[in-house]
Amino acid sequence: MLITISGPAGSGKSTVAAGLAESLGYEHVSGGDIFRDLADDRGLTPLELNKRAEEDDQIDRDLDRKQRDIAESRDDIVLESRLAGWMAGEHADFRIWLDAPLSVRAERIADREDKSVELAHNETKERGKSEALRYREYYNIDIEDRSIYDLALNTARLSPDGVRAVVESAVNAYAPDDDEGQTPVEGVTYEF
């Protein structure tokens, strides 16, 4: 089974994806780790790489192509990134969207990256705007469209263990034989 976990920076998707993958015995593939590694390799912060990606669309396209290739060719994985649900498309068995208010996400990021909450807030807000513009331009994806997701959850309302429990419960309750049809991913142009 291919499970995707999507959401903005600081929503808890990496934490939940890693825990879910471990409990299911699946591989965890993180788009965020790939992106941060790419930024580090270039001596940039993720925000700086995002800015470069506004000028060089191949940065996003390479990462997204990799996600799409993984979704097409592998099974028993939890694929996690902002666009995982969109990039996996029809190959995903279960798509999850995690979110939290910007103020909560900024606090989480500030703690994780050892920076001020104000800086994390400003960077996260700017990063989100930048990404939304690129996703629309490259693939015709409206990142605010949640209609393709099987489960959407505000992670600010529960503890990390509570979020994981809700997600695990939903995934464990999913029975492919009883599936009456997922929402199709339509209108996306997969041109890498």
Image: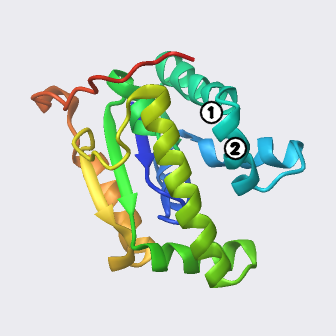
Tell me the kind of residue under disc 2: Phe
- Asked whether 100 or 91 is in front, the reply is 100
Q: Position of residue 176 (x, y in %)?
A: 21, 29
Residue located 36% across and 29% down the image: 92
Q: In which quarter of the image is residue 61?
A: top right
Question: Could you tell me which secondary element the residue under label 1 belongs to?
Answer: helix
Between 126 and 15, the residue placed more toward the observer is 126
- Residue drawn at the location 54% of the way across and 60% of the way down: 9
Mark 1: amino acid: Asp
Q: Which of marks 2 and 1 is nearer the N terminus?
A: 2
Residue 30, quarter of the rendered image? top right
Q: Which one is nearer the viewer's eye here, 8 or 56? A: 56
Any part of residue 22 in sight = no
State left or right for residue 3 relative to residue 186.
right
Q: Is residue 147 toward the left or the right of residue 3 in the image?
A: left
Q: How far apart are marks 2 and 1 (CA)?
A: 9 Å
For disc 2, the marked residue is 35
Badge 2 marks a residue whose secondary structure is helix
User: Quadrant of the image for the N terminus?
Assistant: top left
Is the residue marked by circle 1 packed among few (<14), some (14-19), or many (20+) residues within 10 Å?
many
Which residue lies at the image location 53% right of the left edge and 47% below the top edge? 131
